[in-house]
Image (cartoon, grey):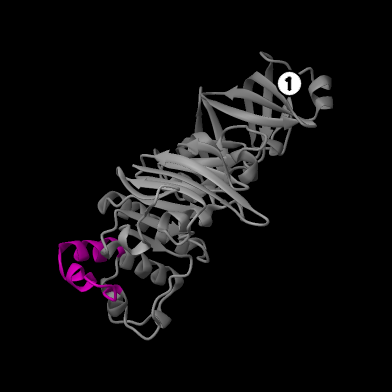
Amino acid sequence: MIAAHIEQRWRDFSLDVAFQSQGPVLGLFGRSGSGKTTVLHALAGLLRPEVCSLSVDGEELCKRPGGIWVAPEGRGLALVPQDALLFPHLSIRANLVYAPGAAAELAGPWGQKVLDVLRLGPLLEREPGNLSGGERQRVALGRAWLSKPRLLLLDEPLSGLDGELAREVLVLLFEAKRSLGVPMVFVTHRASELIALADDCLVLDEGRVVAQGPPLDVLSRPQATGPAPLIGVDNLLRLEVLRHDEASGVTLLDLGGGQELASPLCAANPGESLVVGVRAEDILLCRAAPSATSARNVLEGRIDATDAIGHEVLISMRVGSQRLRVRVTPGALRELDLRVGCAVFALLKTTACHHLEG
């Protein structure tokens, strides 16, 4: 378990963050400038905050005020920055064993396990300049894991990688989480990475914690200043793939209650689950089923809540076994007589459904 409290004030920014997490993977999520990397550096001991406390598995690593300060090299934590920071003049093998004791680990069972999970064996005699961005990131991760850290700190591990390379590294991180058993704290601004990898997430905004909990639960909360507006998605649905209709270019997903959601064609197999994000403003409401529409999805549901948020109204409705949130104007609410308990139809295009990692 990790428990931390960090307070620091600068001229134009202040950080006040306190949290506990059982892991094994904690994601730090938020927009740029929210304090995510600062928290990571404080955990690593690269900052000396005015007020701080940190314990990992019950061992205190810092407490200010209080006089406890374990130097970064004595904390047993490994930090992987956004830039892999490999030595360009050394081979991959030499990069991996640069730290004291790493050569012995590489030659032993732990080293072989790290090489296998991250698929580093074929890269050992190459140099960083001849590697792709994804390969360099795998080497940086391998170097960190070889040190057998009690906690691995990752700063935007997929930053700068294109879609396919990012997916490859994400799959390897997921495999490493399962096979290597080293707890992780990672920084990201991508909801898909958070959902795919984290067991617990901490959402930061302007140096403060605005939410914490399981990623899918936290990111789905309809808070006016909370996680949903940070990613621009009010609806995050974990749905089972029913079948593919390649002729129409859609993948059909199970909403429960006999209703299906047509989403863009994807590679997931029937029976697998994936997460779909839908913006509340991309959904239209009708009191009666339309006779003709270009929207592939006409979903029948019932309103169970309405909440005024600023100059908008957030409507919550049940569709099958799922809940959808829809944003409308106060005028639309009045004109359509939208009330709790009334039956409505939700219209959304296939292209309004965005696949996230499942």
**Which of 167 and 64 lies nearest the eye of the viewer?**
64
Query: Percent position (x, y) of residue 192?
Result: 51, 48
Give the farthest residue toward the top: 341
Q: Is residue 259 visible?
A: yes
Q: Which residue is pictured at 51% across the width and 24% down the height? A: 321
User: Picture quarter containing residue 165?
Assistant: bottom left
Quick one: quadrant of the C terminus? top left
* Residue 288 within the segment the image draws in magenta: no
Mark count: 1
SS class of the residue under badge 1? loop
Q: Which residue is pictured at 40% across the width and 72% down the height? A: 136
Span of residues in magenta: 96-118
Relative to 337, 357 lies left or right: left
Query: Percent position (x, y) of residue 190?
Result: 54, 51
Quick one: quadrant of the N terminus? top left
Q: Which residue is mark 1?
A: 288
- How crowded pointer 1 is (Cα within 10 Å; few <14, some 14-19, many 20+) is rated as few
Query: Percent position (x, y) of residue 197?
Result: 41, 48
Above/below status of 118 relative to 89: above
Q: Is residue 268 visible?
A: no
* Residue 114 within the segment the image draws in magenta: yes
Q: Which residue is pictured at 63% across the width and 23% down the height? A: 317
